[in-house]
Image (cartoon, grey):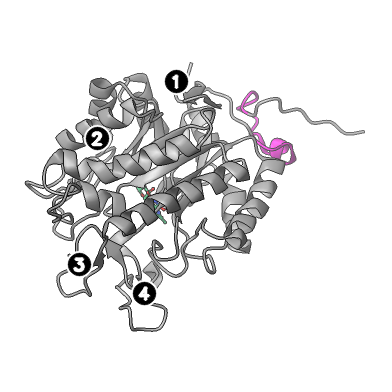
């Protein structure tokens, strides 16, 4: 019996299996609003057979977008755009759908990756002034962000809450708060980006304060049946900066506040990072969070092979696996994994006739007939 295809619960949310389609920015929205690209992209991924599909980093404000093409959930138009895509997905797929709520902080106002990804300065067409814990740019010669004052912090916290309420209204199954990859909440955690001298900077407790305030405010605004969890960078990959010990303290504090899971990634706050890349390179961080904090974890990062994913779950290293690049490359990855591991997977009836002869029991409930 495959453990990867065992059901799994995040909070009260039941998932058919432990494959999570990780959030992936598409930089293809207009004023935060998705269009046909999202219909195609999320539509086809929703047929993959994963237990959960996470909608990409979705900005809680226009200023919090990484690029002008980022998806947002801060206006009636963006909410209606997501509702349209979600209705189509729901009509044809049982995969649960979550959303990642995000604020880019000092990494906002960038060009899209296929235009080089560089900062767009505030005076340039399409650019705006980014906000951050401190007026410290991501890259030395960039325009520095504006440091948030107390009123600014309250505004960002309220924007997370407002976006979460929209997510609830949309009927999304779960919400992930993005505190990884060098974006705003990670910037508060990391001493590389957080140079504040007030109660939001300096000691570990102080650096945890704003991300925890945001989490608690969102948790209070979302019904208990909808799980809320957090994506973290377990380390900055820079000596003396944010690391696994801080991550464990953060995860403990999140658990006390009702966090349902931790999605364990790494890096993104500093161009000086020295990442030790390799298959499953972030899994050891997920294993420590699971073992030492006792929260369910999603491991992510270069998990590409069915046997590898199975071993991570069967070995108790994580409760679910996230996939990004490998599932873009092969959107039927869960079908192939189920076939290899002797499991069953959901496939739409329109595609049941594709079930290969040697895997007679692959698709849940599959049957065909004609006169
Ligand atoms: C096209 C693309 C877009 C991404 N966008 C996001 C995002 O919106 N939010 C996020 O937390 N990570 C994002 N990531 C990172 C992935 O979620 C994932 O953590 C990373 O790619 C490592 O997993 P992989 O080896 O399976 O690709 C993105 C990755 C890719 C390839």
Q: Which residue corresponds to mark 1?
A: 3
Mark 1 vs mark 2: in front: 2
Q: CA distance from mark 2 to mark 3?
A: 24 Å
Q: Residue at x 49, y 39 (%)?
A: 221
Q: Give the Cα distance between marks 3 and 4.
A: 14 Å
Q: Is residue 170 magenta?
A: no
Counting other residues with Cα less than 10 Å from the Cα at mark 1, is it few (<14), some (14-19), or many (20 or more)? many
4 or 2: tag closer to the N-terminus: 4
Mark 1: secondary structure: loop
* Disc number lying in front (4 or 1): 4
For label 2, the residue is: 250
Mark 2, secondary structure of its residue: helix
Percent x, y of residue 292: 23, 22
Q: Are marks 4 and 2 in contact (CB under 8 Å)?
A: no
State the extent of the magenta-drawn residues as a range: 347-362
Q: Which mark is residue 137?
A: 3
């Amino acid at each position: 019996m495959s453990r990867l295809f065992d059901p799994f619960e995040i909070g009260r949310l039941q998932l058919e299996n432990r494959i999570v389609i990780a959030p992936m920015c598409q930089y293809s929205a207009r004023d935060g609003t998705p269009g046909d690209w999202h219909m195609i992209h999320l539509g086809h991924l929703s047929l993959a057979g994963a237990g959960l599909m996470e909608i990409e980093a979705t900005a809680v404000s226009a200023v919090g977008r990484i690029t002008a093409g980022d998806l947002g959930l801060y206006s009636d138009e963006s909410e209606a755009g997501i509702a349209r895509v979600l209705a189509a997905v729901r009509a044809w797929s049982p995969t649960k759908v979550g959303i990642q709520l995000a604020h880019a902080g000092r990494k906002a106002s960038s060009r899209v990756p296929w235009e080089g990804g560089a900062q767009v300065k505030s005076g340039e067409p399409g650019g705006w002034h980014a906000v951050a814990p401190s007026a410290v740019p991501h890259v030395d010669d960039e325009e520095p962000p504006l440091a948030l004052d107390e009123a600014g912090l309250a505004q960002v916290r309220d924007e997370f809450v407002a976006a979460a309420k929209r997510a609830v209204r949309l009927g999304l199954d779960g919400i992930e708060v993005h505190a990884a990859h060098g974006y705003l909440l990670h910037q508060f955690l990391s001493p590389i980006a957080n140079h504040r001298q007030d109660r939001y900077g300096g000691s570990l407790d102080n650096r945890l304060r704003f991300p925890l305030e945001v989490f608690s405010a969102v948790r209070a605004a979302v019904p208990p049946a909808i799980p809320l969890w957090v994506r973290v960078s377990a380390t900055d990959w820079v000596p003396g900066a944010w690391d696994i010990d801080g991550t464990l303290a953060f995860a403990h504090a999140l658990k006390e506040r009702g966090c349902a899971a931790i999605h364990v990634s790494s890096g993104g706050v500093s161009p000086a990072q020295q990442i030790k890349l390799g298959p499953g390179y972030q899994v050891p961080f997920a294993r420590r969070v699971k073992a030492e904090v006792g929260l369910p974890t999603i491991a992510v990062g270069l998990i590409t092979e069915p046997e590898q994913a199975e071993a991570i779950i069967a070995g108790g290293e994580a409760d679910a696996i996230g996939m990004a690049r490998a599932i873009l490359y092969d959107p039927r990855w869960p079908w192939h994994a189920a076939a290899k591991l002797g499991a069953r997977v959901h496939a739409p009836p329109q595609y049941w006739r594709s079930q290969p002869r040697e895997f007679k029991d692959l698709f849940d409930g599959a049957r065909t007939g004609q006169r």
